[in-house]
Amino acid sequence: MANDKRAGRSTREMANRRHQSALWIGLIGIAVLIVASLFILNAKALGIGGLGILALLVLMRVFGNLIEGQVDRKIKLEKRAVRGAKAEEKVGELLAELPDDYTVLNDIESPYGNIDHIVLGKDSGVFLIETKAHGGRVETDGETILVNGRAPEKDFVAQALRNSYWLRDSIGAIVGSKPWITPILVFTNAFVPPTKPIKGVYIINKKYLLDVLHRTSRPNAILGQVWENRKDIESKLM
């Protein structure tokens, strides 16, 4: 069962911040260009000669291009965040289908960036899930992920591992023993052929996610402690 924190909330908030930033940059740019235009219209009264007007026109052109570039960049980042939020929401909907012997935590802050989802399975283990909205084809090249034949913008495996170590230590501090964490990279829009985990990180399409979560882990006492203390873990991580 999922907790009350909505999947993708932080990413939606990020998209909104980027949208607001684009608006402010655009408004400030327009204001500056209006002021410059007024200077040009009143050049004679202000004692601005032909060279001064020419300089203002050049500066307006350069400044306008700069503002346009900044706004375009913010809009692209906003669209990327919206795609990411939609991907997290899709995975959140899948995780909401899990039965009562699972606890799902969404949108958990860590020192290495937000963790999209954490799943505590009574009999299956502890899972850390990072959701990716990339399209196309995802493959592996040795110990590297390739998205459409190229390395992605970040090292997704390293990110998942850093968060997994942090989660292991955080839960260990609560239950007294460090549990095994299974990190999963879930691509919601890309084709992911069957592949071996990289450094223990599973790389899958969303349609295989529940199958991985339903696999029973090797019996261990730590998993029982995690399940018994799941409320404390949720309160500390949230």
Image (cartoon, rainbow, N blue to C red):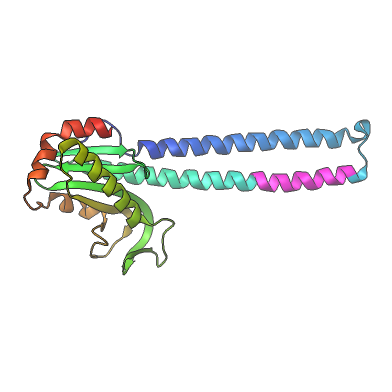
Q: How many marks?
A: 0
Is 146 located above or below residue 177 in the figure?
below
Magenta extent = 52-67
User: Which quadrant: the C terminus?
Assistant: top left
Judge whether residue 225 can be spotted in this image.
Answer: yes
Q: Is residue 62 magenta?
A: yes
Is 230 located above or below residue 199 in the figure?
above
Residue pictured at 17% horizontal, 46% vertical: 179
Is 199 located above or below residue 176 in the figure?
below
**Quarter occupied by residue 173:** top left
Residue pictured at 43% horizontal, 44% vertical: 81
- Give the image location of residue 167, x and y in percent: 26, 43
Residues 141 and 41: in front is 141
Residue pictured at 19% horizontal, 35% vertical: 174
Judge whether residue 96 can be spotted in this image.
Answer: no
User: Which quadrant: the N terminus?
Assistant: top left
Residue pictured at 26% horizontal, 61% vertical: 199
Q: Is residue 9 magenta?
A: no
Q: Is residue 47 left or right of residue 120?
A: right
Residues 121 and 40: in front is 121
Q: Is residue 100 left or right of residue 41?
A: left
Residues 40 and 228: in front is 228
**Quarter occupied by residue 53:** top right
- Give the image location of residue 50, x and y in percent: 92, 44
Query: Magenta residues: mostly which secondary structure?
Result: helix
- Give the image location of residue 201, x and y in percent: 26, 57
**Quarter occupied by residue 14:** top left
- Give the image location of residue 231, x and y in percent: 17, 31
